[in-house]
Amino acid sequence: MKVRFIALAAALMFAVPVMAQEQRGTIEGVITDTSGAVLPGVTVEARAANGAVVSTTSGSDGVYRFPSVAPGDYIITASLQ
């Protein structure tokens, strides 16, 4: 009985870190013009290979961020009105 308990405890100890693995990623960057000045208010889109599109707007510091995207290739486009 004691051996089974130890084996079960060992199995659980190794299984817990596996549950914590993340299957998402982050895309982030800074939008600047040709002189290097940051551009706030730029609409940024990330288009996945499967056609899914997510959109955000750059902040006052020109930074845009997609905090939780699936692994894969993305095409990033930016537009400013």
Image (tube, rainbow, N blue to C red):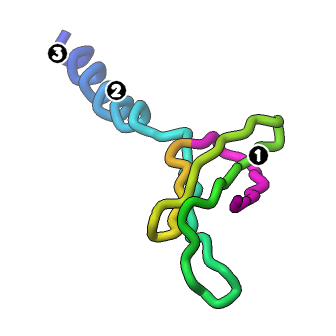
Q: Are marks 1 and 3 in contact (CB under 8 Å)?
A: no
Disc 2 versus disc 1: nearer the observer: 1
Question: Residue 27's x, y, as percent?
Answer: 58, 56
Q: Quadrant of residue 4?
A: top left
Q: Residue furthest front?
A: 81
Q: Which residue is mark 3?
A: 2
Q: Quadrant of residue 20?
A: top left
Please name the amino acid that badge 2 sits on.
Ala
Label 3: how many Cα within 10 Å (few below 14, some 14–19, many 20+): few
Mark sitting earlier along the chain (2/1): 2
The Cα atoms of the two marked residues, 2 and 1, are separated by 41 Å
Magenta region: which residues? 69-81
Label annotation for residue 1: none
Going by the image, does 42 lie left or right of 21? right
Q: Quadrant of the C terminus?
A: bottom right
Q: Residue furthest bottom?
A: 35
What's the residue at 75%, 58% (across, down)?
77
Mark sitting earlier along the chain (1/3): 3
